[in-house]
Image (cartoon, rainbow, N blue to C red):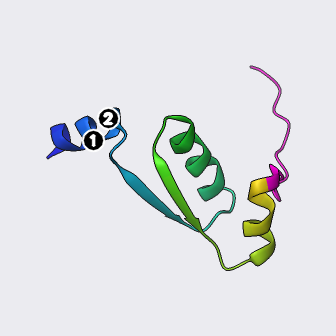
């Protein structure tokens, strides 16, 4: 089963739905999309959904010093 999933991922034949585009969901969806996976994002906040096509994020990311 894992081999089949990896093959579908490599060939671009996989879709993923992310429920909740908050601090975890939005970055997770972005990473998957960058890897070529078709991602559907769902959130109850309409402003979050409307902001995605204009490349705006509602998240405030903390600055972390390099260790």
Q: Which mark is residue 47?
A: none
Which of these two is toward me, 63 or 29?
A: 29
Does the magenta portion include 57?
A: yes
**Which residue is the extreme one toward the top?**
67
For this rendering, which residue is in front, 63 or 55? 55
Highlighted range, magenta: 54-67
Vertical placement of residue 49 versus 35, above or below: below
Going by the image, does 48 lie left or right of 36? right
Callout 1 crowding tier (Cα within 10 Å): few <14, some 14–19, many ≥20: some
Marks 2 & 1, CB-CB < 8 Å contact: yes
Residue 47 position in % (x across, y down): 81, 72
* Position of 63 relative to 28 (above/below): above
**Residue designated by label 2:** 11
Residue 11 x, y percent position in the rendering: 32, 35
In which quadrant of the rendered view does residue 58 lie? bottom right
Q: Secondary structure at mark 1?
A: helix
Q: Main secondary structure of the magenta part?
A: loop
At x 84%, y 43%, the residue is: 62
CA gap between label 2 and label 1 equals: 5 Å
Residue 12 image offset from top left, x and y in percent: 37, 40
In the shown orientation, is residue 40 left or right of residue 26?
A: left
Marking on residue 8: 1
Q: Is residue 47 left or right of residue 8?
A: right
Q: Residue at x 17, y 37 (%)?
A: 3
Q: Is residue 67 above or below residue 45?
A: above
Q: Residue at x 35, y 49 (%)?
A: 14
Q: Is residue 4 magenta?
A: no
Residue at position x 81%, y 33% from top? 64
Q: Residues within 10 Å of mark 2 (few under 14, many from 20)?
A: few
Among all residues in the image, which is located at the extreme left? 1
Position of the C terminus by quadrant: top right
Dot 2 lies on which element? Answer: helix
């Amino acid at each position: 089963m894992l081999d089949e999933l990896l093959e579908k991922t490599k060939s671009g034949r996989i879709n993923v739905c992310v429920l909740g585009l908050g601090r975890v969901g939005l970055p997770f969806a972005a990473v998957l999309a960058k890897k070529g996976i078709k991602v559907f994002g769902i959130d109850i906040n309409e402003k979050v959904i409307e902001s995605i096509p204009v490349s705006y994020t509602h998240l405030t990311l903390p600055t972390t010093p390099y260790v």
